[in-house]
Amino acid sequence: MHSSNIDFNLLRVFIAVYQHRSITVAAETMGLTQPGVSGVLKRLQQQLGVPLFIRSGRGITPTHQAHELARQVEPALNQIQNALEGIESFSTANSRRFVVYTTEPVMLMLLPKIEADTSLGQVEIELHPTLSSEEKLINNLNQHKADLAIDFANYSAPSFFSEFFLNDEICVIARKAHPRIQNSLTLEQFYAEKHVTLKLRREDAYLADYFTEESIGERKVAAECDSLVSQMTMVSNCDYLVATVRSIADQFAERLDLQVLDAPFTNIPVKYRLLTHNRMKHSPANIWLRNKLKSYFIHD
């Protein structure tokens, strides 16, 4: 076998199949047919003289040789990709769609800023709700289903790059006409009132519990929501309390006739981070996207 004659495109297809663990998905992402991708794998296996994938259940599993090949080839392919992108250099004059996974508060803050941005040119930035498990999120970034995630969980996945994005903090909201709570809130009042709570899907904890130093005792719960917006709407019509994030409380307080109160416990700041796969760290397009999103909050 003359490995020096191996076509660069065979390796690109191999890496796509390796990353997705699926011929179908690899074919879709590369705009090829399934038989086309299978044919390429066959040719590569014949040229290398080793098996690369074995069937398992419905899918395929890489062999030891495939793992070795991917370990060596993937960084090189990423370098080539980034070099080509660098030569073209990223330009908003070319049509490009970015997908960003984010939490609800950040989505509510970002959307108006993206809409008002007149310098995006042909670029679209699409926001999607962040996924319910860390594993799914990492997986989807790995498979190029999204370009970036904004999240407050502290990920320690070694193949990912993350950087600080934004600080937020917990506060409590009540409607302005609340009969008992006006302008300030004690811990006793916090426990005496009924609450509309929000479960964080991922940690299955309440928002306030996650970002306070003390552990919060049992609250009287009137309703449990899965969205900050529904929480705010409910509390604007009833005499309940809601622990939420200040960025959103401030944004909607006037419109919904809410008072924003300091939380009566010690806050841990809600730190949002930008998260992307290591291979995108030096990609001109991804750098542009990260800088663009950060620029929206520099002047706040």
Image (tube, rainbow, N blue to C red):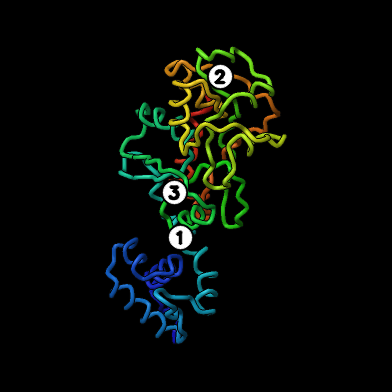
Q: Are marks 2 and 3 in contact (CB under 8 Å)?
A: no
Residue 292 seen in render: no
User: Toward which corner of the image does residue 273 lie, by quadrant?
Assistant: top right
* Direction from residue 298 to residue 110 in the image, left or right: left
Nearer to the camera, 163 or 220: 220
Count up the numbered dots.
3
Give the amino acid at mark 2: Val
Residue 149 seen in render: yes
User: Toward which corner of the image does residue 33 lie, by quadrant?
Assistant: bottom left
Give the amino acid at mark 3: Asp
* Direction from residue 166 to residue 140 in the image, left or right: left
Q: Which residue sits at x=33%, y=73%?
A: 37
Tell me the element at label 2. Answer: strand
Q: Which residue is mark 2?
A: 260
Question: Quarter holding the N terminus?
Answer: bottom left
Tell me the element at label 3. Answer: loop
Q: Of the residues under marks 2 and 3, which one precedes in the sequence?
A: 3
| Cα–Cα span, label 2 and label 3 | 35 Å
Q: Which residue is mark 1?
A: 80
Q: Which residue sits at x=33%, y=68%?
A: 24
